[in-house]
Each structure stands twice: as C-alpha cells, then as structure tokens.
Image: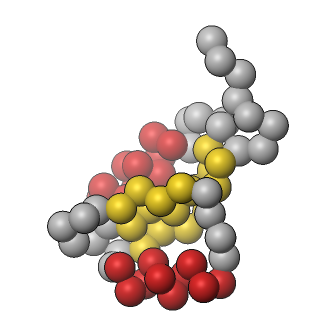
Amino acid sequence: MKSPPDKPYRLMIADDHDVLRLGLRNLISRDPGFTVVDEAASGQELLDKLEKQTCDLIILDLSM
C-alpha cells in the first residue's frame, strides 16, 4: 500500500447538488492523502472562493 504524502492534497469540490458534494466530502475524508478545504454550488462561487484561498485539486461538475 502506498503511503500518503507528507502534506495532504488540498481539494475543492464544485457541484450544484448538495447531496453529491456531501457524499464526495465524506468519501474523500477517509483518505489521509486529501483534505477538502471548501466546496461551491456554482462556478462563480468557486471563482470567488479561489480568490481567497488556494487548493491543489478541484473536482468540478462540468454540467452545472
């Protein structure tokens, strides 16, 4: 089994469905290599949040 990185990847989730964001957050939180720093319900909300904080990865719903 591969060991997690020294510092977990910082992740943001952007999806217009609350249930999907919650499910992804719960699933990702089980892996010590990742931490969800924030989530957004729209593309504009994501852009606004990215102006205030950074992340390494974004999970983005392309059809929202």
Up/down of 42 relative to 39, above or below: below
Residue at the extreme top of the image, as rendered? 1
Q: Residue sitting at 62 percent across and 44 percent down?
A: 34
Which quadrant of the rendered structure holds the N terminus?
top right
Could you tell me if residue 18 is visible in this image? no
Q: Which residue shows up at 56% across the image and 43% down it?
A: 29
Q: Position of residue 58 (x, y in %)?
A: 47, 59
| Image coordinates for residue 37, horizontal then vertical, percent | 61, 63
Q: Residue 5: x percent and y percent?
A: 74, 34
- Asked if 49 appears above or below 61 in the picture, the reply is below
Q: Horizontal and vertical percent for residue 36?
A: 58, 56
Instruction: Identify the image quadrant of residue 44.
Output: bottom left
Figure colour scheme: secondary structure
Answer with left or right where residue 41 lies relative to residue 28. Answer: left
Q: Residue at x 33, y 79 (%)?
A: 42
Give the residue furthest to the left. Answer: 63
Q: Nearer the viewer, residue 1 or 21?
A: 1
- Which quadrant would the C terminus be assigned to in this image? bottom left
